[in-house]
Image (spheres, rainbow, N blue to C red):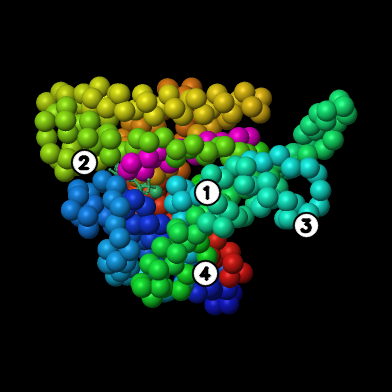
Amino acid sequence: MWNFFKKKSPSVIGIDIGSSAIKVVQIKRVGEKAVLETYGALALGPYAEKEVGQATNLDTDKIVEALNDIIREAKISTKTNGLAIPFRSSLMSIVEMPDVPNKELAQMIPIEARKYIPVPISEVSLDWSVIPTDKFSESKGGKKFPTKNVLVVAIHNEAFKKYQEIVTKAQLDTKFFEIEIFSTMRSVLSQQEKAPVMIFDMGAAFTKLYIVERGTVRASHTINKGSQDITSAIASSFGIPIADAERLKRGIGLSKTDDGKSVVEVVDLTLSYIFSEANRVLINYQKKYNKAVQRIVLVGGGSSLKGLKELSQQKFGTEVSIGNPFDKVEAPAFLENTLRGVAPDFSVAMGIAIRRLQELE
Ligand SMILES: Nc1ncnc2c1ncn2[C@@H]1O[C@H](COP(=O)(O)OP(=O)(O)OP(=O)(O)O)[C@@H](O)[C@H]1O
Ligand SMILES: [Mg+2]
């Protein structure tokens, strides 16, 4: 039987250590398909004497303890992995450079990057890629000369050191580190998509926005409010503990409570702030590139909030969908609903796992 000869790969894991929760997925290749083997999420709040759903700032030993716990709970059976680096540990800018061969660019970029990166270049690791463009710049004499837009990414060496220490202590075999933005792009966008898309990643303390066009990041922004601010607003308005507010939020989302209280009203201030910041980013993009974002993809645990998709569609006046990274893998049919419910949480971890699998081909 041909099935017998189907190409199989070893299992790989994608790890996302978020500020409020660790997410892991394990996948492998069977024939042409990537197959989901196991996945799991673990709230970090309880490791920091905080509630579930709250952002933490744990030392490496506590993170290792939590990582070992989730690896055991999710029955992860391999050590080979990639690991996500938080967006906040990176600096990203789009730099206009002369149209010279990449070899020359490689020498020019570290020098040019000094203008854009507010920390000494020796404290970061630089990476860059050319953004396809047909733009011409005006030279002083009015003549046009071609330029290249280059996405320059810097990661704090301190962040590398911290995550290296974590995986070493957890005895994992980490093949690469990747800034979470690239992982999410891989797991929720299609490579064929040409029009600009905005990824809206609502975590616990922050909401991260990335505008992606033709597979390249064109703009990014971090809003200093996230899903824990929604919980706090519910807790203080309803006079209930954070843990109860978190349960209520995850249970009914933006609907009315049994006794008729309106969640939408009490979280309006927080959500309006987030939406208006996001709108500002959309408008700036449109002005700069003379192109509108065509659709918005919601990811991150905060995007599981019931009613958020409909509300954001209304606020943005643009097509909004909830990212489902599990679409990229095959999973048992009976899990379909469960997976859809938690899908936005796993965008980063799944993107990492897919890259690791691709590297094995
Ligand atoms: N079903 C749900 N409904 C509403 N909110 C939810 C739900 N599930 C999780 N959340 C919220 O999502 C937030 C966590 O999201 P996520 O796991 O993406 O954050 P993180 O990755 O830890 O944060 P960051 O990426 O900012 O470091 C928490 O504040 C939690 O309350
Ligand atoms: Mg996250």
* 67 in the magenta segment: no
Which circle's residue, 2 or 1, is located before the other in the chain? 1
> Which residue does the numbered mark 2 point to in the structure image?
246
What secondary structure is found at the residue carrying circle 2? helix
- Residue 175's disc number: 4
Range of the magenta residues?
195-207
Residue 289 x, y percent position in the rendering: 66, 28
What secondary structure is found at the residue carrying circle 4? strand
What secondary structure is found at the residue carrying circle 1? loop
Closer to viewer: mark 3 or mark 1: 1
Which circle's residue, 3 or 2, is located before the other in the chain? 3
Instruction: Check mark 2 vs ligand 1: CB closer than 8 Å? yes or no.
Output: yes
Along the viewing direction, whichever of 240 and 145 lies nearer the viewer:
145
At horizontal 41% and vertical 35% (from top left) the residue drawn is 223
> Which residue does the numbered mark 1 point to in the structure image?
119
Amino acid type assigned to the residue bearing label 4 in the image: Lys
Instruction: Indicate left or right for 144 with 338 as reference.
Output: right
Which circle's residue, 4 or 3, is located before the other in the chain? 3
Which circle's residue, 3 or 1, is located before the other in the chain? 3
